[in-house]
Amino acid sequence: MANLANRFGSNPILAPADLAPSAPGMRIECLLNPGVFRFSGKTWLLVRVAERPEQNPGITSLPIVGETGQIEILEFNNDDPKLDRDDPRVIRYDGREYLTTMSHLRLVSSTDGIHFEAEPDYGLLSGSGPLESYGIEDCRVAQIGDTYYLTYTQVSQHGVGVGLRTTQDWHTITEHGMMLPPHNKDCAIFDEVIGDKYYVLHRPSSPNLGGNYIWLAESPDLVHWGNHHCLVHSRPGMWDSARVGAGAAPIRTSEGWLEIYHGANHGHRYCLGAMLLHPEQPRRVIARSVEPIMEPVEPYEQQGFFGNVIFTNGHVVDGDVLTIYYGASDTVICGAQFSISQILDSLS
Ligand code: MAN
């Protein structure tokens, strides 16, 4: 097992009880999958907060954003034969799918990168409009110049796509609508231009022919994305046999762009691996982890709302030290450090 992670001794660093629900009657079920950035001398997490109403016996209640923009609560009788509750994350009723929780994004900050506190002066980011009526999830934060680019999952009955918002001060946040249409998620913009182009990793799904693969696209202006190219597939029989998806923006190294990605097998076990992209031609994959660099082995990574999950979409880099923040079991937030040169060595 190629486990290269050095986990924080204080894991988990944030749990649902550490934050207040967004409204009376709501309960935070999960904190997960934070975007990460540095701003005003501190490390910040843009945490995904998944909530639902307090549950009553025999009834599944879930929130959606109604047409007027207000949160509405839907209720389903657990005995109803049309109700399928097999997956804790999604229910199916009469041919339609709903998320059991609704997610918004919340800012917390830290001076030491380990102890995080709520930032009540900064508003929370919620779903808005018909393409985000089931919430917003798993935001990557890229910084280009003094602008932060937020790419996140938009969820609604219309499908799962990638939304874009930008900000410079985290008080005024501009919405740019849907950047990549369904089905697409796990979208990470590179923090630097290569040649004269912006690049992005993304993860369209093509379930009938193809799969859940990581793609690369380019843009002259961060608005128009094209020249799509499929970078890596899931690999039959391996730890990433069912799905793969990018983490945060790739890290520039002396050997190329190092991307930490998640891979899951058909048992929904989510691990992390790495791949190395050519420094000038990022569509060339130079190397890829045969074994995961991090697997769910700690109790908090194996048990929770959805167990056996390590999912990262945010990190900070200090020289050779890569600090990732990750969602564990879709329930709590944790941290771990890696040596970048050790990851690169594991790829050769
Ligand atoms: C999907 C996403 C993630 C989540 C994992 C594991 O990839 O919804 O947000 O962490 O599944 O449930």
Image (spheres, helix red, strand yellow):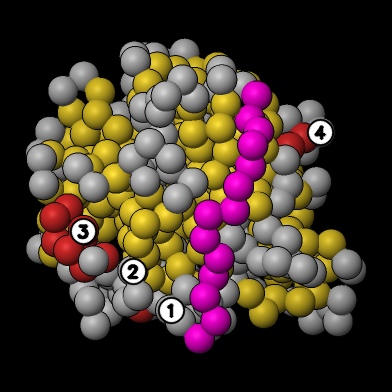
Residue in the image at 12% along x and 48% along y: 321
| 218 shown above or below 330 | above
Residue tagged by mark 4? 67
Give the mark nearer the N terminus: 2 vs 3: 2
Tag shown at residue 239 = 1
Q: Position of residue 331 (x, y in %)?
A: 40, 63
Separation of disc 1 and disc 4 at Cα? 41 Å
Check disc 1 and give the amino acid type. Answer: Trp
Q: Position of residue 327 (x, y in %)?
A: 37, 58
Residue tagged by mark 2? 289
Of badges 3 and 4, the one in the foreground is 3
- Label pair 2/3, CB-CB below 8 angstroms: no
Of badges 2 and 1, the one in the foreground is 2
Separation of disc 4 and disc 2 at Cα? 45 Å
Tag shown at residue 344 = 3
Give the mark nearer the N terminus: 1 vs 4: 4
Question: Residue 284 in magenta?
Answer: no
Examine the rendering and report whether any part of residue 213 can be seen: yes
Instruction: Single out the residue that lies furthest toward the bottom.
Output: 237
Q: Position of residue 204 (x, y in %)?
A: 65, 52
Q: Which residues are magenta?
A: 224-237
Task: Provide the secondary structure element on which disc 1 rests.
Answer: loop
Of badges 1 and 3, the one in the foreground is 3
